[in-house]
Amino acid sequence: MSSDELATTTSLCPDCLEPVPGRYERRAEGVFLTRECPDHGSVSRQVWGSLDHWEWAAEFGPDPEHDGGDLTVDPDHACLAVVEVTDDCNLSCSFCFASSGPGGEGRSTAEIDALLDTVVEAGGRPIQFSGGEPTVRDDLPELVTRARDRGIDHVEVNTNGTRLATEDGYARTLADAGVTAIYLQFDGLTVDTYERIRGVDLVDEKRDAIDACRAADLPVVLVPTVVPGVNDDEMGDIVRFALDNRDVIRSVNFQPVAHFGRYDQHEGRYAIDDATRQLAEQIESLDPRDMLPAPCCSAYCQIGTAFVPREADVGEDSDDGRGADGDDFPFVPLTQFVDDRLWDTLSGLVDEGDYMELLAWTAAGQEWACKTASCCGVDAGGVADLFDEVVAVSFTGFMDADAADVNRLSNCCISVPTTDGDLVPFCGYNMTTTDGDYALRNRNGWGGRETVDGGRATEPTTDGGASR
């Protein structure tokens, strides 16, 4: 191993997505993934902004090693199964995992039943109905009921919120059908952000969708796609907005833009450690290392914390709602009261099926939090009192071809069911080559569309917006 080589792995060539040897290398203060393909040569892309943070993150979570078999997800490890019900969308976005838009095809009910059966046979993990835009299907409430009738307790809907905002009673219809949370695309608070990322002003519709969910008692997870130079300066304001509306918004899941599906241009990846540092510059009480790795997947895939009111903390600085540094942000990260070793222990107690429940603060997630608190000697009743005040904030760094690591793919906790009865890694399912081919999906017969916009991954349509 050279002085600049940090680790080796099995990677994928960005041009063909065939397995090739890969190595992580130190360059200046960042970390690069370099790989050699016999057909397409050498390529090296930056995957982490800070060597120091990369080495710190390595101390957490599993250290997966691919066994050389198929890229399928261990059902016991899957936190969430994403069930795509349509390629159709009522908008058309510059940034979209699914490369969806108006006129896409919907899946048949029989095919969706088969996908739900795959989830049930894998242990009935939480699901997310997605697309495309799932609310373009008038039978979505029926599909939700079909999932709940199979014993699937947690059913999210991933949506741009347009129908929730514009159709009276639609949120209540979804709630009555059994939806347990809304996974709402929410890129920011300004017109400019939506016009640049989605091609259309959606500010009022986002607020109206949240109000509709509030009236229907439907928990909301805000999901911003973060694009450097566009809305990365709004992350702190999004967190504040979520905290101001914490009666209905349960968490924020930031998703730094990645290079798959449809996107504007192929530039450097926005690593989650860089995004975390930028958020910390915008939130007075947050330190980058307060964002700790998720309890299930790789520490390089997801990190997060939960903000709690200052008056709930145990320090002397909580009596007037202000911190020791004099800031007036009335919330602090809960992880400040947990050291890294204890967090690693607590993470090991989380059943993967409960993690999404925790993010949405559903009844099952609250039950787990109380149980864990009791195990640690904390008054569970006091924890329960905090439920309406806590907002989880996380970053998910989706793995595109630039960062392809087969070992991490094999440990993916977000899965996509197939009609053949498998759960496959979400990032592998959506990963595209430089030319826009869904090569892993096609090679393994996982289903779905074959290319992005006819194979042009870097030339998006921009006449609207989309939920992903």
Image (cartoon, rainbow, N blue to C red):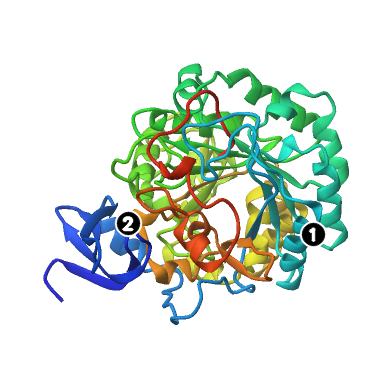
Residue 183 marker: none
Give the residue displayed 57% in from the left and 65% down from the top: 445
Image depth: mark 1 or mark 2 in front: 2
The quarter in which the N terminus is drawn is bottom left
Question: Foreground: 8 or 50?
Answer: 8
Side of 43 where 385 appears, left or right: right
Which tag, 1 or 2, sits closer to the chain's start? 2
Can residue 379 be seen by looking at this rendering?
no
Q: Is residue 211 above or below residue 154?
A: above
Q: Position of residue 326 (x, y in %)?
A: 40, 31
Q: Position of residue 46 (x, y in %)?
A: 26, 52
Give the residue displayed 65% in from the left and 59% down from the top: 81
Q: Position of residue 333 (x, y in %)?
A: 50, 46
Question: Foreground: 36 or 229?
Answer: 36
Can residue 210 be seen by looking at this rendering?
yes
Task: Please tell me whether mark 2 sits on a helix, a strand or a loop.
Answer: loop
Q: Which residue is mark 2?
A: 15
Side of 118 where 289 appears, left or right: left
Within 10 Å of the Cα at label 1, are there few (<14), some (14-19), or many (20+) other Cα atoms?
some
Question: Foreground: 324 or 25?
Answer: 25
Mark 1 to mark 2 CA distance (whole Å): 35 Å
Quadrant assignment, res 175? top right
Q: Is residue 369 above or below residue 183?
A: below
Q: Is residue 274 above or below residue 446?
A: above
Residue placed furthest toward the front: 454
Task: Please tell me whether mark 1 sits on a helix, a strand or a loop.
Answer: helix
Give the residue displayed 48% in from the left and 49% down from the top: 451
Q: Is residue 453 above or below residue 411?
A: above
Residue 113 marker: 1
Q: Amino acid at mark 2?
A: Asp
Q: Amino acid at mark 1?
A: Asp
The quarter in which the C terminus is drawn is top right
